[in-house]
Amino acid sequence: MLKTIACGYLRKEHIGKKVTLSGWVHKRRDHGGLIFVDLRDREGIVQVVFNPDSSIDAHKIALELRNEWVLRVDGEVRSRPAGTENPNLMTGDVEVLISHGEVLNPSKPPPVYVSEEIESDELLRLRYRYLDLRRPKMRDNLILRHRVVKFIRDFLDNLGFLDIETPILLKSTPEGARDYLVPSRLQKGHFYALPQSPQQLKQLLMVAGLERYFQIARCFRDEDLRADRQPEFTQLDLEMSFVDEDDVLSLIDDLYTALVSTITPEKQIPTKPFPRIAYHDAMTIYGTDKPDLRFGLQMADLSDIAEETDFVVFRNAITSGGIVKGFAAPDCSEYSRSQVEELTEFVKTRGALGLVTLGVEADPDPNATMYSIKSAAGRHIGLDKMNKMAQRLGAKPGDMVFIIAGNEKVTNLALSQLRHELGSRLALADPSVLSFAFIVDFPLFEWDSRENRWNSVHHPFSAPKEDQWKLVTTSPGDAISKCYDLVCNGNELASGSIRIHKRELQEKILRVLGYGDAEMEDQFGHLLEALEYGAPPHGGIASGIERLVMLLSANAKTIRDVMAFPKTQSGADPLFGAPAPARPEQLIELHLKTLD
């Protein structure tokens, strides 16, 4: 055999045993006679020793070894000499004295770092991903991902869920992002679409009477990429019949709590069961529907106080229908002018027109009724109004108040990202904490002023609350849905809803969204027809696997770090050179012609 045991499995109990190991040369050290090699395989690293007094032939081979050569060795496990143990390795108490060695394959000098904890350029890492994945921390991320998926499968299997695959080649249907289209060779001018999610398919499985379905599903979306987005990704897709909102949320609460305690017990979940925060409250307090709850910096609307000032920036924002809003950050009152200017530029890149700061100074008089506050806008706002703002935001001496005035959506976006930035700079977020929460009571619709139409906040199959059906047609913007998101540490991890299970109600929603009868039948006819055949009440959720593993990992900065072969932020694959032009004969077969 090429190996009798994995390198990383060797322990004190193996001392005196003969073993055969195979792996990669992680590091080689020549001590002028003795040659030490750290031999690495998937399970870890062990030190092997080449001693010319034990085997001159093996020692000759060791003289030629270089990093990343593939090596097979035979030897005896022994204790490391006293004082040379390595507490940083699981195998650090033992080593293997080599009696025979064989080079299975030499290696060119690798273009990316494998044995050193030095980050190579990411583009280079993706170009040589098969080498990058040899690095222990990348290997550990993929092992963690495997364990997470296995836990999910076992957990849901024990609850009676069926793992059912759904098709990849489907018809294009609107679900919020651009589809990837696949031309049909057999049907000229026709296209398949890769699924953005199995949404309609899982609903059809509920109509089919399967009651509890899940799938570790591949999804495809042609959208702008960022740290937590890829053109193809994996999600836990889950659907249940005869359930209400509380049933779905309780299941996910139990799943994630059990998963974290089993897979990453070093992580802490501060609040169980997970808190449920209404969408309106999340936007009011945190400016976002995916807040990081590991720290405070809670926001408040200051528009009523601002309206009483002579500050034209505040008054213009309110007059134009906007808001004035802010939060207080601890121990920032002594921020320099350059630090404030840097944060001002930060919020401007998020759409804000500027940033107003109020530095709350320590007052030597403990009986003072007002704080001393310094601000570049102080003479326009007035000390009394600045104190009212500071008090509303819970500011204390030494704190800095950050205020933005403008359009409500832009103000919330800029303030929420400033809050997240300061939470990071001030080290307010404990990296060992996973602060889960459900965001509930989302609006059913949002108005698209550019398209002059209503859009679904989640998707068109989500049901409104029972008492909201009248508002669907009379006041769509006020209707509240049975939609919910799972968030953690500023990330959206999962999204779902209770679905519409009656045709006439589904058509009602689609008409609000602007679909005519013909378009409705073309895009959704299969689902509408199925709802007429005794569709049960049902609901579900879809959870991103990569985002979850990224949060659980100790060394992942983006979801690319937990995927075997990801794309760049431009959607390119440096390893395979994709996307690439199609060969002329392929285009002819598919009845396609490219535009010059």
Image: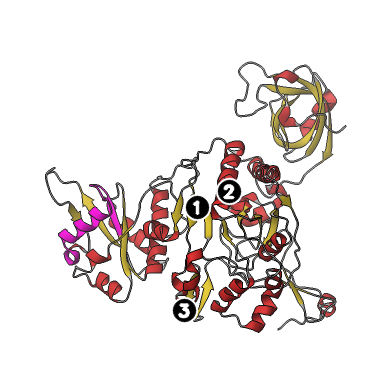
Q: How far apart are marks 1 and 3 (CA)?
A: 29 Å
Q: What element carries label 3?
A: loop
The residue range painted magenta reads 379-402
Disc 2 target residue: 252
Does the CB distance between marks 1 and 2 fall below 8 Å? yes
Residue at position x 56%, y 35% in the image: 265
Disc 3 target residue: 449
Disc 1 target residue: 438
Residue at position x 66%, y 45% in the image: 152
Quarter of the image where the N terminus is located: top right
Q: Is residue 249 left or right of residue 335?
A: right
Give the percent coordinates (x, y) of residue 387. Answer: 19, 56
253 or 327, nearer to the observer? 253
Give the percent coordinates (x, y) of residue 81. Answer: 66, 17
**184 is higher (above) or lower (below) than 251:** below
Going by the numbered disc 3, the residue's amino acid type is Ser
Dividing the picture into quarters, in which one does residue 98 lie? top right
Going by the numbered disc 1, the residue's amino acid type is Phe
109 or 207, nearer to the observer? 207
Residue at position x 54%, y 52% in the image: 246
Q: Is mark 1 on a helix, strand or loop?
A: strand
Q: How far apart are marks 2 and 3 (CA)?
A: 35 Å
Question: Mark 2 vs mark 3: which is more N-terminal?
Answer: 2
Nearest to the eye among marks 1 and 3: give it.
1
Q: How far apart are marks 1 and 2 (CA)?
A: 10 Å
Going by the numbered disc 2, the residue's amino acid type is Ile
Question: Mark 1 vs mark 3: which is more N-terminal?
Answer: 1
Give the percent coordinates (x, y) of residue 297. Answer: 35, 51
Q: Residues within 10 Å of mark 3 (few under 14, many from 20)?
A: few
